[in-house]
Amino acid sequence: MKIELGESALKWQAIAREYADEYLQPHEVDAELNDGVLPGEITRRNKARAIELGLSAIDVPKSHGGLGLSMEEQVAIWEQLGRVTNALSWCFSEPQSWMFEACSEEQIRNYILPMMRGEKKDCYAITESGPGSDVAGIEATATKEGGDYVLNGEKWYVTSGNLADFFWFQATLPDEDGEALFLVDADTPGIEVIATPKFTHTYAAHHPTYLFNDVRIPASARVGQPGDGMAYTHSWFRHERLMIGARSCGAMARLIEEAFEFANSRTVDGLPLTEKQAIQFMLADSATELYGSRLMTYDTARAVDGGADLKVQHSRCSMTKLFVSEAANRVADRAVQIFGGRGYMRENVAERFFRELRVDRIWEGTSEIQRVIIARCLMKRGLTDM
């Protein structure tokens, strides 16, 4: 199923596929059976190889020593990394281009560039128990006291918090209008892990709940300028929603390939299972949804590369996340059905993806939140300007 890509995107697609196939995929079952954790030497090897290939620098501007790849190239990379289960591709950090717009030179030097070099890892403390996906309802506060800010609030689902060196902390400003984003070192006094829930997937990266209780940080830890509000968090959401689409495309492709290979080798009544029309229909529907998903994901990436209006980018990234994540879940369900009892075993890729892909309809904004965003854009701009 070929989508027309530029020469550079095809090159990066091949690099990422080789990395996924040779360094990550062989360790999926080991990770699954060991709480998502691989031996330290394997994780270090995989991280070192990713950095050597430049995967941690793909969205870093060339002015700061990065590769500054287009969004089409980045989607081509993450589509291939999406073929791997157990979040094994999370072994390296990936600074995003907006961070270099938002952060001061000191913040870039102390936090962002060390991420690119593999020396630091970040996590996002945004979601809360009450507003959930509604970031406009955030209740955590940052109060100015002299030359410092004092942070208070409870943050849920802080992905990779157990592995991170610092937080991106989103808060409201009681003494000012609006909100702001802050960089907070993980070892700052006043930060407490109050829960580490078990989740459906089996990842080494956990999603703890944190209490920030009178956490004092210097004013220099504030990201951006007064009035920026949620702008950079929205940039992060756009990027992540598009990459959920990319990774889901990779997951769908692998599921279809593995389900087809199994069905073609499985004999029922003297014929391969692929000769059964019921199986053919499931494979046909899955291939069709993958085709539509890839077209949408790459078209959105090209719109970003082309400098489309930010509101258009926002709605298209939401459309991509909504459509592709929902489609990927349907493909995973069909794959489990094709594998039968084998598809219910944790050693089977369909079983793992069946669990893992479910959260893509929830995090970075639920499917329902995406529908709200899309509907609002439709009402304000009309169909032709979306």
Image: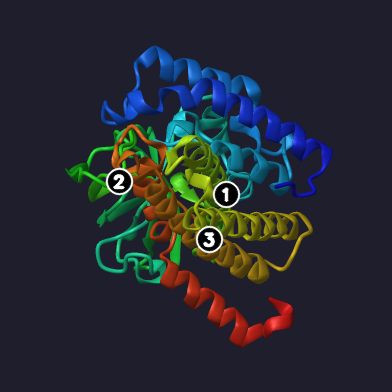
User: How far apart, in angstroms, are the residues tagged by discs 1 and 3?
Assistant: 11 Å
Q: Position of residue 315 (x, y in %)?
A: 60, 70
Q: Which residue is mark 1?
A: 249
User: How far apart, in angstroms, are the residues tagged by discs 1 and 2?
Assistant: 42 Å
Report the residue at 35% width, 71% height from top: 137
Q: Is residue 160 above or below residue 319?
A: above
Q: Which residue is mark 2?
A: 216
**Residue type at numbered disc 3:** Lys
Report the residue at 55% width, 40% height from top: 257
Of pointers 1 and 3, the one earlier in the residue sequence: 1
Question: Does residue 46 appear to the left or right of 144 in the view shown?
Answer: right
Task: Pick whichever, 216 or 115, lies toward us.
Answer: 115
Report the residue at 62% width, 44% height from top: 100
**Residue type at numbered disc 1:** Cys
Question: Does residue 15 appear to the left or right of 323 in the view shown?
Answer: right
Pointer 1 local density, CA inside 10 Å: few below 14, some 14–19, many at least 20 = many
Q: Is residue 76 above or below residue 144?
A: above
User: How far apart, in angstroms, are the residues tagged by discs 2 and 3?
Assistant: 36 Å
Please tell me whether mark 2 or mark 3 is closer to you in this view: 3
**Are the residues tagged 1 and 3 within 8 Å (C-beta)?**
no
**Residue type at numbered disc 2:** Arg
Of pointers 1 and 2, the one earlier in the residue sequence: 2
Disc sitting over residue 225 in the figure: none
Of pointers 2 and 3, the one earlier in the residue sequence: 2
Question: Does residue 23 appear to the left or right of 194 in the view shown?
Answer: right
Q: Position of residue 270 (x, y in %)?
A: 46, 40
**Are the residues tagged 1 and 2 within 8 Å (C-beta)?**
no
Residue furthest right as drawn? 7
Q: Which residue is mark 3?
A: 321
